[in-house]
Amino acid sequence: MLRDDARLPQDRLAQEALLLATKADIQGELDRLRAHIAAARKLIEGGGAVGRRLDFLSQEFNREANTLCSKANAVELTAIGLDLKAVIDQLREQIQNVE
């Protein structure tokens, strides 16, 4: 595709490269995971009836983990995502015991 004799328009090549780079970028997912962790810690520290809110946050954790796994183009990242999903499942089990 990058050869001089390739018939792919440069603007199309740039669009495809941007699309691939955007799909591979996991910074947004990592930022949201950090925000969810901070929110969960705040809920736990605050005490009270937090089970439902923690359950909601665990769903958000799971969404981010799923997105990380779907964006993974490296075996190591997939393994980390799967480990994260296992921990989230453990968290959800513990949340069922809260309240």
Image (spheres, grey):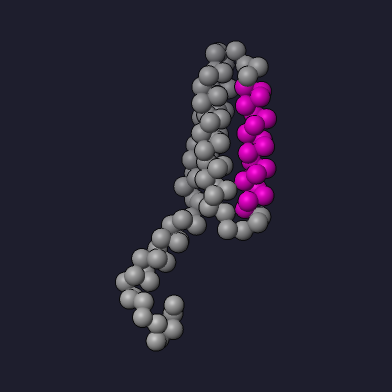
Q: Residue at horizontal 33%, vertical 76%? A: 9
**Camera-nearest residue between 34 and 20:** 20
Based on the picture, tell me whether residue 58 belongs to the magenta stretch.
no
Measuring from the top left, give residue 47's x and y in whole percent.
57, 16
Q: Residue at horizontal 64%, vertical 28%? A: 91
Based on the picture, tell me whether residue 90 belongs to the magenta stretch.
yes
Measuring from the top left, give residue 63's x and y in whole percent.
52, 38
Measuring from the top left, give residue 23's x and y in whole percent.
46, 56
**Camera-nearest residue between 39 and 13:** 13
**Camera-nearest residue between 51 and 31:** 51
Q: Residue at horizontal 40%, vertical 86%? A: 4
Q: Magenta residues: mostly which secondary structure?
A: helix
Q: Locate residue 90: give its quadrant.
A: top right
Q: Residue at horizontal 65%, vertical 17%? A: 97
Residue 7 visible in the displayed image: yes
**Camera-nearest residue between 44 and 32:** 32
Magenta residues, as a range?
Answer: 77-95
Residue 30 visible in the displayed image: no
Q: Locate residue 43: give its quadrant.
A: top right
